[in-house]
Image (tube, rainbow, N blue to C red):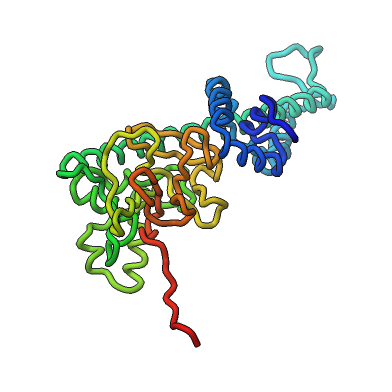
Amino acid sequence: MSRLSREHLLGFLLDALAPDEQQQIEAELNQNPKLRDELQSLESHHRPLGMCDRPQPIDPPAGLAARTCDYVAAQAAALVTPGGALVFPGVERERRFTWSDFVTMAAVIVAAASLFFPALSFSRFQAHIATCQNQLRLIGFGLHEYSNRQPDHSFPGPEVAGNRAATGIVAPILVSNKLADSQTFLCPASSAGRRPGGFRVPMPEELDRAVGPELKHLMASMGGDYGYNMGFVEDGKLVPARDQRRSGYAIAGDAPSNSRPRRVSGNHDGYGQNILNEDGRVQFLRHLPSPSILDDPYHNRDGLIAAGLDRDDAVLGASNDHPMPVQLISDGPR
């Protein structure tokens, strides 16, 4: 592929290219602003048609065809006449239901089911995305209200050391200030499988008292299914992000996953992630990096899982992510 065309960009948008072609286009997008604009234009024209948000189709439930045939056969058996023919009640004897009619009906039912279940799955997928986006908007309301109460308009964030040195501390801070409740931090499509009635965000004081395994458990779970802005480093110090209503600056989103490439979220079956921007807008990004958000939301500009390198470098961490990069201490020369 020597030269990119609209067909290549469209194939990239619809996940229809080979892996090596996908990687080549991603590299070109990172270096060519005009190409990113062209891709964004294509995406804006195709998104209303639903072409950019299609999940992979799923197979019908196992054994559906066999169960359908068994059911139809059981119902038909009750209508067998002494002459060996099948008739419907209330229909003249001359109008008989033959086995070929039965097979045709069963085939129609199976074909209809094969069309219905993928459509049902897609509708459920879209509903989960919409519900997740609503949860993030509620989190955004809490974050902005907290920011409005601060003299410097800073958002809540992790500390550099201690029991509160984990990104998920954002959730306990919002709950303790009555700016959100525990259920707000659950995504309906999360792979964690948390039950709404059984999940509770701990209070900051409870986290301060915890030690050992209890502390590790609270750090790993307190943020729920979402990730939060780690802040940034300024003059060697960790500083929380401040509200400037920026359109491409991520302050929360679906939690990143260490088990997936590029730490993409495990929510929504890995098909994408919702990102809440500082201006309150929520976007569903199918690909990372994305033409609409050039900044990697799960790594800083050095590619590390740590706080941003400056005030414009937004990084979302999972609940137990530490805001500062891990440094190995050497024993010295041996």
Q: Quadrant of the N terminus?
A: top right
How far across and down, in percent of the image, does residue 205 sit? 20, 62
Say above or below: 205 vs 68: below
Q: In this image, 71 relative to 127: left or right?
A: right
Which residue is at the front of the view, 72 or 295?
295
Say above or below: 159 vs 123: below
Which residue is at the front of the view, 175 or 278?
278
Q: In this image, 36 relative to 127: left or right?
A: right
Q: In this image, 83 relative to 143: left or right?
A: right
Residue 320 in view (yes/no): yes
How far across and down, in percent of the image, does residue 173 sit? 23, 52
The residue at the point 73 percent across, 26 percent down is 79
Which quarter of the picture shows residue 249?
top left
Which residue is at the front of the view, 283 or 207?
283
Residue 195 in view (yes/no): no
The residue at the point 65 percent across, 43 percent down is 23
How far across and down, in percent of the image, does residue 87 sit? 76, 20
Which quarter of the picture shows residue 66?
top right
The residue at the point 84 percent across, 27 percent down is 84
